[in-house]
Image (cartoon, grey):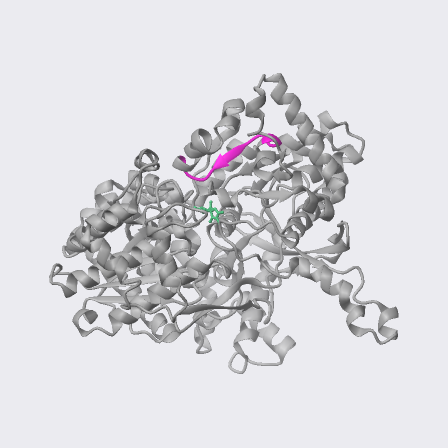
Amino acid sequence: MSAFSQDILELLRLDYGVSPEQASTVQIYDAVSRAAMAQARRRWQTPARGKRACYFSAEFLMGRMIGANLYNMGLLKECASFLAAHGLDMNMFEEIGDAALGNGGLGRLAACFLDSAATCGVPLDGYGIRYRYGLFAQTFEDGFQKEAPDDWQRFTDPWAVRREEDAVLIRFADQTVRAVPYDSPVIGCGENALVNTLRLWQAEAQRPFDFDLFNRQKYSAAVEERDRAEAISAVLYPNDDTREGKRLRLKQQYFFSAASLADLVKRYKAAHGPDLSGFAEAYAIQLNDTHPTISIPELLRLLMEEGMDFDAAFAVVCRTFAYTNHTIMAEALEKWDVNLFKSVVPQLYPYVELLENALEMELALRRVPREKKQNYRIICRGQIHMARMAIFATHSTNGVARIHTEIIKHSALPEWYALWPERFNNKTNGITQRRWLALCNPELSGLITQRIGDGWITDLDQLKRLVPYADDPATQDAFLAVKEEKKRQLAQVIRSKEGFRLDPTFLYDIQIKRLHEYKRQFMNALSILDLYYGIKEGRITDLQPTAFLFGAKAAPGYYRAKGIIKLINEIARLVDGDEAVRGLLQVVFVQNYNVSYAEKLIPAAEVSEQISTAGTEASGTSNMKFMLNGAVTLGTYDGANIEIVEAAGEENNYIFGARVEDIEKLRQSYDPKQIYQAEPRVRRVMDALVDGTLSDGSTGVFRELYDSILEGASWHRPDQYYLLLDLIPYCETRLRLNRDVRDRRAFAKKCLLNIANAGQFSSDRTIRQYAREIWSV
Ligand code: GL7
């Protein structure tokens, strides 16, 4: 028996006094994780020398760590056989340890980056918050979303180590709290692998309770201070792409930024002595969106309190930090009310003013005319503009896909690009092929490795060698067999989780991502209605039976997003209850879509829905995961879709709809009512919302959705995301795709060419670009 298996047995025996047969699922999970952890810890030391990069992020959407860690350590097979020998298997860990400390793409990107950096030998550590509760758990009641707390730590957290000795105090105007770090090893895969660190800070009170008050029998008052401290890291804000100017949110941001910087300064001094002028040569810090931007005045403060003058300190700050922009949606650009800011972190405000003054001097030097200065001011009309601060006080600002970076430079922030063009650069997002192919799709991985070897696991460009196989009927058939198997497996999962019988012979068309108007799940729903009426009216006669799958969480306060979930659930009910279409259409909205669910859905997909309004989705990353698993993209010219289609061939994907240039031209004159009136199919599906066909349980939310398209609202024009403009082209492209899939081998060829050309979308590539072009590590 291997040392690893022996360790597991011993942990079970010593800690729990059980054999594998007697052990509970949690006990096995704990023992397996800790046995692996013991091995990882031998390779887990931070080297004393050399520059390190740090990824500051309010979100790390790690998902379940056990599988990925065992895989990267080369222990997965051994673990599987150990479990099998005792009549168990890896699926038993299903309900345990899915750390949802992020909302969506932005948080998952951070997790992929950690995996890639450790694999590529890039010294990169993650810094963030150890939320007590992650993104809410979602269920549906009568088709409406219900939220419940995500108590992810309730079993154990064997992958983290509490580092009491590295705790620091964080000062706010009204409280001082302890920040206690929990470290997880980030274990790379392959020959160049490192073990880096993810350090998440937990907020605690300086003392557990007030003894005095307790003795006087004032029990709630005695623990009040503790509760107020713990509130800071209690919950992840459930908003994706919108930012609320909430006090607690600002506290969270300062909490982890200040703790992380205190940590780095302490380490720097231990290694280099008290003079901090070389700080930027020791640490490169990437700001993941504006959430950690408060680090800028904080580092300035730390440096100046050590005696550095402003100019010297500012130079260190600029050389240390780099900023990634992840969205240009107006409501997502973070601003803090000056008074709120001062009432939370008054010690920082003078440093914000220093930054503002330095900016003012720079603008004067560059002869920016008075009337244009408004666009630059960090402090403007009683608000602090975090993105402006982030561009001004860093050496690099990057977008996350080619089109997104171009939009930043030429339409979102052109005045900044005009002043500092050399700071702006693109880093197209990527995904880790370890989790998103090797681990989640061993069947396809096996087929690929059988054809081209396993070098792709750490060098995804090697997938190019699959190109010749795209024409090979044996490979096409093998691919189709794998897809069928993954669809069968997914159908089983959905049967047990949702109680819905998905037909594995149907075409699987999947849209999974946060629920947001700009992502246009609503348009997908309207298009399904068009298919439904098309079949009923005899306009569509030869449809390849299709299952439309959705997964999405709506921010709890986002009324329309929740209405769209209800709408899709009602359409599912309509379709399911109608004999005439039942053999042709299925619609299912899965509950509690998360990383683990994605790992089941993506390998089974044949069609990847990427249908955001052109110019709105900065990049998207699920588009890359689907591509890697051999789905074709049905999408718009937006985000990374453009680069995907460029790499894999437009003929192997299905692109439709208005482009950014079209929308810009149309913007002023766009009138969705005209389309509604001129096009009976559009009218038919829109009217279904309000004519009694579909019921919203008398909430009025379907009427509100209808009005948002045809009437607009006080804060936006009608159909602000151009659903009606793109609806018919979308439906027609969908039908064309549907006709194409009948030729199974021709379709398999398209899928194989997507896989073969997915190499550039590895986050290994992205991380190497950050390392070389931004961090110099
Ligand atoms: C996002 C973008 O919306 C998404 O397109 C991008 O892929 C992701 C990672 O760069 O970042 N921006 C954002 O605010 N959220 C995202 O997911 C929440």
As drawn, 427 above or below 605: above
Q: Position of residue 673 (x, y in %)?
A: 28, 48
Q: Is residue 708 visible?
A: yes
State which region is magenta.
Answer: 392-402
Say which of 194 and 261 sits in front.
261
Q: How many marks?
A: 0
Which one is in front, 630 or 238? 238
Image location of residue 321, percent across then percent down? 61, 35
Is 172 in front, or is 115? 172
Query: Residue 602 sits in which quadrant?
Result: bottom left
Q: Is residue 528 visible?
A: no
Does 397 lie within the magenta span?
Answer: yes
Q: Is residue 607 left or right of residue 589?
A: left
Furthest residue in direction bottom, as rendered: 22
Could you tell whether 243 is left or right of 627 in the image? right
Q: Does residue 13 show up magenta in the picture?
A: no
Q: Quadrant of residue 545?
A: bottom left
Q: Residue at x 42, y 37 (%)?
A: 404
Q: Nearer the viewer, residue 729 or 650?
A: 729
What residue is drawn where x is 30% and y is 56%? 524
Q: Quadrant of the C terminus?
A: top right
Query: Does residue 549 sit above or below 674 in this rendering?
Result: below
448 relative position to 704: left or right: left
Up/down of 449 relative to 402, above or below: below
Measuring 13% from the left and 59% from the top, which residue is drawn there? Answer: 540
Q: From the top left corner, tell me how far across and down residue 680 is, in percent.
A: 18, 54
